[in-house]
Amino acid sequence: MQLNFMVNDYLLIWSLLFGPSISEEEHAEKQKLWLSYKRAYHALQEEQDTILKDVKNYIPDDDTIYNLVFSSNFYPRIKKESEKHRIFLMEIWDKNKKVIQKNLKEILRFDLPNEVDVFVVHPQLDLAYCKNGEKMSVVCGKKIDRNCAVATLVDIIYLIVRRLLSDYQKEQKEIVQAVLELAIQNELLTRVLGKSTYTRGDNSLKFLKRQIYPYFLMYLGADREELPKYMMRDAIAFDLDQYVMEKNLAKIDLLGFIEFCVKNQRYILRINQLEII
């Protein structure tokens, strides 16, 4: 899977208009636009989905507000900063994409889209989401931890895979999300960084993930002798004697593993037997 990073004016402007204000100047200009062009401003509120259906070919029915933002004093600066953010993300991707693609394939074991467009908006908007249109795309404007910039790429990949599986096992969405976090937020990032990131993720899924964790290691192909090494790496402990080795898990893809967790959740849930090293 290739990520294509770009900035789109219409999507950036829409995000500025309906996202949090990122400067006093921009906030003041938005207020003026709202007071002077309420009907046109309000009409754009539902335009996000229309833009994302085909971002590159989007043409607004009424470009009044867009043109006013284009010609504003604040927009050139925000556009320049968004482009700078795009270039930084692209450089991090180019540097890490081979190791990410290799390990992602090993972990998921199913095909992803060949390409996904990532539309970059200003990082101070602090947003990231994935949508389906003519093809899947991501909108991302997140502040980056310069000490762990690659984590932003992994977050983007997580959004893509989660969107792909949004209709899979819908009645068991917590199990699906827990497995996806283990696979991408935790194992993929751990492999890329060379150190454990198993503390990352939704705090409400912490205990569910620990319950699935022993079987996830079996899915990764770990044998009984290797399990203590992983437990030490990730600071997650469990009683080996309480688990039967499910060797067939290493032969299926992540969808099959989710199905295994759903079907066997009654005996996977062992919350009282888990502890942190």
Image (tube, grey):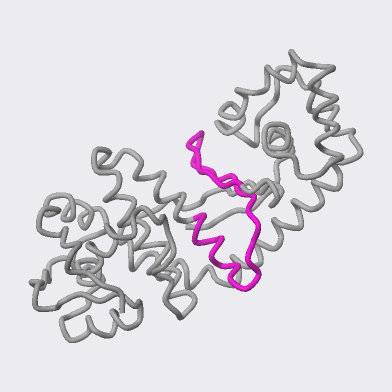
Q: Position of residue 211 (x, y in %)?
A: 22, 63
| Res 91 → quadrant | bottom right
Would residue 173 be counted in the magenta stretch? no
Q: Give the quadrant of the C terminus.
A: bottom left
Residue at (35%, 55%) from the top-left corner?
111
Residue at (36%, 53%) from the top-left corner?
204
Q: Nearer the viewer, residue 63 or 265?
A: 265
Toward the top, the furthest residue is 39
Q: Is residue 32 above or below residue 93?
A: above
Residue at (75%, 16%) from the top-left corner?
40
Toward the front, the furthest residue is 272
Q: Nearer the viewer, residue 214 or 139?
A: 214
Residue at (69%, 33%) from the top-left corner?
14
| Res 43 → quadrant | top right
Q: Position of residue 9 (x, y in %)?
A: 74, 38
Query: In the figure, is residue 14 to the left or right of 231?
Result: right
Q: Is residue 12 above or below residue 148?
A: above
Q: Is residue 230 above or below residue 15?
A: below
Would residue 142 be counted in the magenta stretch? yes
Question: How many numbered callouts?
Answer: 0
Q: Position of residue 6 (x, y in %)?
A: 67, 49
Query: In the figure, is residue 263 to the left or right of 64?
Result: left
Where are the magenta residues, as a range? 127-156
Q: Position of residue 46 (x, y in %)?
A: 60, 22
Q: Is residue 140 above or below residue 186?
A: above
Query: In the figure, is residue 63 to the left or right of 97?
Result: right
